[in-house]
Image: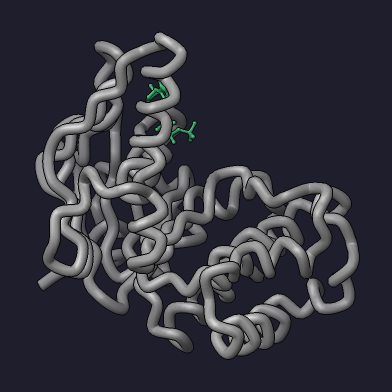
Amino acid sequence: MSMLEVSSLMVFYENALAINNVDLRCQKGEITGVFGANSAGKSTLMYTISGIILDIEKKERMRGGERVTVLGSIYYEGADIIFMETSDRAKKGIILCPERRRIFPESSVLENLKIGGILATRAQAKKTLDYVFTMFSPLKGLKKREGGFLSGGEQQMLAIGRALMAQPKLLLLDEPLLGLSPMMEEILVRAIEDINETTGITILISEQYARPILPIIHHGYVLENGVSVLEGTSQELMDNPDVKSAYFGI
Ligand code: ATP
């Protein structure tokens, strides 16, 4: 059985359909990719799996704003979690590393990491901290630096590190390469592969450009205007003549 199984998922912002009848699976221990252009629905999908969409819905309802509607099912380790609170999903190991990092800019690197590990045991936090500083060695010399003074690449390392501190079983990475140089992209892609291989954490990763990520995913989906138009292994996606130029810039 898949670790995560999304079925017939629909998400509306008022009358606009952001996710349209999407089916998606993540197999335990694998890296799954979701690729799509701007506004394809990648962040909405991540919000819906992590539960943040329910917080958005509540906030909108309280301020009399737009209606957010979620339909379908999301099975995680065998139970439907579609209406489960974000914090309960986090306790079960579903952790989102959001688009544009969203680190705490006025807190230091170490504080950002410790905040991420607030629910971890002392032993887990220590082990993960060691792993984060080994894998993202530039952060080691910047422990006291405020997050807001880091480069984009360092901030992304910190955002992933903070997510790891929360002890994920399913790590959701929303456009982690956004705005990074090709060299930094390469460092992060290698780190993401290492996280998966070393710790066995299951990863769902979204990106606009599939090219840097395709070699490390096991399975991938292409989203277009909220619809999943294609799925396959990385090789199948790369070999598909219809999508090569449109999605992968190959
Ligand atoms: P990007 O790469 O720009 O982040 P995305 O693939 O993550 O895009 P989403 O941000 O999920 O796409 O947006 C999907 C659709 O839902 C878009 O048409 C977007 O305009 C719309 N949308 C997203 N958030 C809201 C909101 N809070 N209210 C209304 N519409 C929204």
What residue is rendered at 41% in x and 35% in y? 55
Task: Decide which of 108, 15 is in the foreground and name it.
Answer: 108
Q: Disc count in the image?
A: 0
User: Which residue is at 29% across, 45% downward?
Assistant: 222
56 or 133, which is in the foreground? 56
Residue at x 36%, y 12% (from the top left corner)? 66
Question: Looking at the picture, how far across and down is residue 188, in whole percent?
Answer: 61, 67
Residue 145: % across, % down: 89, 62
Quadrant of ligand 1: it is top left
Percent across and percent down for residue 159 are 63, 59
Instruction: Answer left or right for 7 relative to 244.
Output: left
Place residue 12 in its image quadrant: top left
19 w.r.t. 139: above or below: above
Task: Give the position of the N terminus as an image quadrant.
Answer: bottom left
Q: Is residue 36 visible?
A: no
User: x and y percent of residue 153 in the render?
Assistant: 73, 58
Q: Is residue 231 above or below residue 236?
A: above
Left or right: 198, with 25 as reference point: right
* Residue 53 showing in the rendered view: yes
Classify residue 91 by image quadrant. bottom left
- Left/right placement of residue 235 relative to residue 91 reads left
Q: Is residue 210 placed above or below 1 in the rendered structure?
A: above
* Quadrant of the image occupied by residue 137: bottom right
